[in-house]
């Protein structure tokens, strides 16, 4: 059986080339150079994690809308998250998703043992969660729910986006004494997860 390549999108026709171009022109030039991170990104087909109509531009350097107010972050965001977290083979990792399991697929490609949960579910306190070495949140949050800290082993890590004064930044933290303190790092634009918004308070 032959394939009519004229009907295929540019990404479908040469997805490997599109991924290599994205790695070279977006990630490497922005300081994402870890070999394991780049190997995972080069292996996982990003176009499989976006709506059909968006596959032709799956590798652009911006977030892609997924519907219902959610979006897949730009490739650089995932490169920065993974470079900060550096998931190790055999580690237990929880990925908090927001409409796409692309980040979870990247972590799995790096050899970690991955569970994923939607942001709408993890925002609610949940007892009995498995102890994880690492939690990755696929978007920017205003506050970290106690359920996330509870899911971590002592000394476990969190890498997420963090909203500070209206600006989104990469942030990381470690569970010590039962609590997680997030440290803001580099500024990077990424989708904000409404499920992790801080409760509004009145001021006079």
Image (cartoon, rainbow, N blue to C red):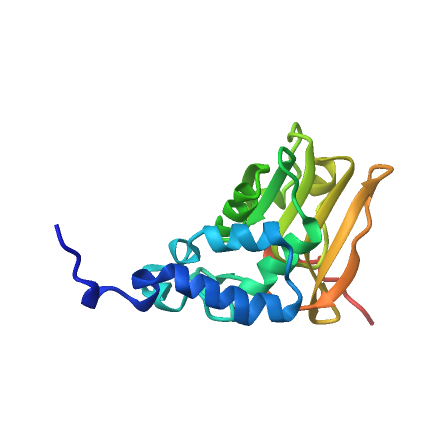
- Picture coordinates of residue 62 (x, y %)? 52, 70
Specify the quadrant of the image occupied by residue 50: bottom left
Specify the quadrant of the image occupied by residue 80: bottom right
For the point 16% across and 61% down, the residue is: 4
- Total labels: the figure holds 0
Reply above or below: 27 against 44.
below
Is residue 82 visible in this depiction of the protein?
Answer: yes
**Image side of residue 13 versus residue 150, left or right:** left
- Picture coordinates of residue 164 (x, y %)? 75, 67
- Picture coordinates of residue 197 (x, y %)? 66, 58
Q: Farthest residue in the top direction?
A: 128
**Image side of residue 56 versus residue 161, left or right:** left
Is 161 in front, or is 82? 82
Is residue 191 visible in this depiction of the protein?
Answer: no
For the point 31% across and 68% down, the residue is: 10
Dividing the image into 4 quarters, which one contains the C terminus? bottom right
Is 113 in front, or is 150? 113
For the point 64% across and 31% down, the residue is: 129
Is 5 in front, or is 73? 5
Q: Farthest residue in the front direction?
A: 35
Is 124 in front, or is 149? 149
For the point 75% across and 71% down, the residue is: 165
Q: Farthest residue in the right direction?
A: 177
**Image side of residue 166 versus residue 23, left or right:** right
Specify the quadrant of the image occupied by residue 131: top right
- Picture coordinates of residue 110 (x, y %)? 57, 43
């Amino acid at each position: 059986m032959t394939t009519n390549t004229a009907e295929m999108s540019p990404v479908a026709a040469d997805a490997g080339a599109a991924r290599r171009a994205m790695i070279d022109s977006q990630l490497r030039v922005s300081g994402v150079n870890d070999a394991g991170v780049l190997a995972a990104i080069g292996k996982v087909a990003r176009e499989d994690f976006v709506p059909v109509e968006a596959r032709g531009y799956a590798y652009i350097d911006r977030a892609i809308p997924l519907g219902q107010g959610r979006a897949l972050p730009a490739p650089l965001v995932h490169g920065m998250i993974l470079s900060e977290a550096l998931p190790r083979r055999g580690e237990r990792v929880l990925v908090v998703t927001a409409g796409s399991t692309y980040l979870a697929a990247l972590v799995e490609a790096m050899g970690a043992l991955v569970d994923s949960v939607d942001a709408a579910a993890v925002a609610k306190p949940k007892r009995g969660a498995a102890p994880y070495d690492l939690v990755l949140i696929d978007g920017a949050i205003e506050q970290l729910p106690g359920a996330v800290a509870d899911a971590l082993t002592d000394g476990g890590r969190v890498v997420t986006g963090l909203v500070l004064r209206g600006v989104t930044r990469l942030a990381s933290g470690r569970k010590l004494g039962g609590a997680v303190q997030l440290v803001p790092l580099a500024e990077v634009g990424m989708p904000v997860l409404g499920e992790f918004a801080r409760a509004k308070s009145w001021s006079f």
